[in-house]
Amino acid sequence: MSTFMANANNIERRWFVIDAAGQPLGKTAVKAANILRGKHRPEFTPHADCGEFVIIINASKAVLTGKKLEQKYYRHHSGYIGGLKEVQYKTLMANRPEMAMELAVKGMLPHNSLGRKAFTRLHVYAGENHEQAAQKPIVLD
């Protein structure tokens, strides 16, 4: 008997909805990253892309514990001298909560071609409504 190895041809992808309202941002991101990667499946294969699609709703209602709203910053550099840009998470959650959730999930995925491919299956919405109702997503607790 040979070992089953998952690949793109024998994986059927499902859609999942995660509600972030009242949940810590990091815990919601962990759930999403595990599903995007496919680690919840019994046929998980580390070198193959066997993850599912994830829709995160109510990203604006996700909470940050402790003093992270004041003390945590999102930093990126333009590449030029003095080009460090930083945004406080209080501002980021007020203006672009989808980006805060995407950054959290992206950091939890592998930093290679598998992670980049998995990240394309993530859909984040600040409110309750999403555009993927036709896919009949499964609601997670």
Image: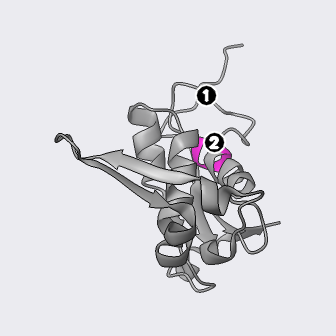
From what the image shows, is residue 47 above or below residue 20? above
Percent x, y of residue 7 = 51, 33
Front one among 129 and 138: 129
Image coordinates of residue 2 in percent, x first then y, are 67, 14
- Residue 52 seen: yes
Q: Foreground residue, 82 or 136?
A: 82
Is 35 one of the magenta-colored residues? yes
Image height of 10 relative to 57, above or below: above
Magenta segment boundaries in residue numbering: 34-38
Residues at circles 1 and 2 in contact by the CB criterion of under 8 Å = yes
Residue 89 locus on image (x, y percent): 55, 62
Given residues 11 and 124, the one toward you in this image is 124
Q: Main secondary structure of the magenta part?
A: helix
Residue that numbered label 2 is attached to:
38
Q: Which residue is mark 1?
A: 45
Please state if 115 lies on the left or on the right of 24 as rendered.
left
Amino acid type for the residue under numbered disc 1: Thr
Identity of the residue drawn at 51% across and 61% down? 88
